[in-house]
């Protein structure tokens, strides 16, 4: 009887852990400076990538992270730090990993979509879903951080930066003379973005959406009017953070409880023979 009571209590304890919301990390973004020693720039502004300290649960990173910016219309300054919501776009689905800091819960910044994109070369306007637009921006962010930075290719990185900005801000490319190059980069990325969830399901866009400065001044974070820019990184699906330790522990507790029950059942049968 006592063992039955322990098993029931053990199981209830584990189930209560499972039904609790998953723990999420508190994330801060600190904008350190340009992502290259030369400080790549075009059209009078610094272009991607940018160097960040991504601070999780108050723990500073061992090294900086290179991220791309998707917001041309908002000004930020080196040295600023923000609380940030983090979400992932993988297999065509947005997965918010943290939204506790946001007063609006609006993740990502440019949601909910659709996104009307103006081609800077032809002025043609085409509508894309939110996922397609972010996949396209992620494609360009990947090229910048994984191809152009290692190859020290500032010219192509500048074009790709403006292509990202043009997706979400229709007048961004006006600051750059080479509209044809921006258009070509953007259209290549948008075309890929339409099939990204199918052709490359492991391609994951990490979206950092600042919600407030560390000094506590809230930004609206509605489309195009956030107090800070939004930033993108790329990872693979097998690096997406796992469920919280508590939830994992609860699963293990349930497994252990089942094992104890089976063990007791076998012992009881032997005792009767």
Image (cartoon, rainbow, N blue to C red):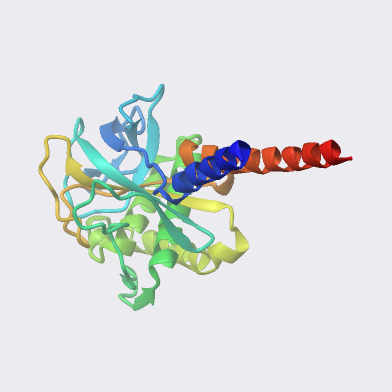
| 225 lies left or right of 147 | left
Q: Is residue 136 above or below residue 3?
A: below
Residue closest to the eye, 95 or 137:
95
Image quadrant where one finds the C terminus: top right
| 97 lies left or right of 79 | right
| 190 lies left or right of 28 | right
Residue depicted at x 41% and y 21%: 62
- Numbered-mark total: 0
Q: Is residue 151 above or below residue 183?
A: above
Spot occupied by residue 53 in the image (x, y as percentages of width and height): 33, 30
Is residue 102 at all visible to an observer of this figure?
Answer: yes
Is residue 239 at all visible to an observer of this figure?
Answer: no
Spot occupied by residue 209 in the image (x, y as percentages of width and height): 29, 49
Image quadrant where one finds the N terminus: top right
Spot occupied by residue 224 in the image (x, y as percentages of width and height): 20, 60
Quadrant for residue 132, please give it: bottom left
Taking the view exactly as shown, the residue that stands out farthest to the right is 273
Taking the view exactly as shown, the residue that stands out farthest to the top is 62
Residue depicted at x 15% and y 55%: 220
Residue depicted at x 27% and y 47%: 100
Residue depicted at x 47% and y 54%: 139
Quadrant for residue 66, please give it: top left
Q: Is residue 113 above or below residue 262?
A: below
| 46 lies left or right of 77 | right
Quadrant for residue 6, please give it: top right
Residue closest to the eye, 249 or 172:
249
């Amino acid at each position: 009887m006592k063992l039955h009571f322990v098993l029931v209590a053990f199981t209830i304890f584990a189930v209560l852990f499972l039904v609790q919301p998953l723990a999420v990390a508190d994330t801060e973004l600190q904008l350190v400076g340009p992502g290259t020693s030369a400080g790549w720039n075009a059209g009078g502004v610094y272009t991607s990538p940018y160097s960040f300290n991504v601070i999780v649960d108050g723990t500073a990173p061992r090294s900086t992270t290179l991220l791309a910016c998707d917001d041309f219309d908002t000004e930020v300054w080196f040295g600023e730090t923000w609380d940030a919501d983090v979400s992932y776009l993988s297999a065509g689905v947005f997965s918010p990993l943290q939204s506790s800091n946001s007063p609006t819960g609006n993740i990502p910044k440019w949601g909910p979509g659709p996104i009307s994109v103006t081609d800077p070369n032809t002025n043609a306007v085409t509508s894309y879903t939110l996922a397609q637009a972010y996949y396209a921006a992620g494609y360009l962010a990947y090229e910048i951080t994984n191809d152009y930075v290692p190859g020290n290719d500032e010219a192509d990185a500048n074009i790709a930066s403006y292509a990202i900005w043009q997706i979400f801000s229709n007048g961004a490319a006006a600051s750059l003379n080479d509209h044809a190059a921006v258009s070509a980069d953007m259209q290549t990325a948008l075309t890929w973005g339409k099939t990204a969830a199918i052709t490359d399901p492991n391609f994951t866009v990490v979206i950092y959406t600042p919600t407030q400065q560390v000094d506590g001044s809230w930004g609206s974070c509605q489309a195009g009017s956030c107090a800070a820019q939004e930033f993108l990184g790329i990872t693979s699906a097998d690096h997406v953070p796992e469920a919280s330790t508590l939830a994992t522990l609860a699963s293990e507790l349930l497994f252990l409880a089942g094992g104890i029950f089976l063990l007791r059942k076998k012992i009881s049968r032997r005792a009767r023979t």
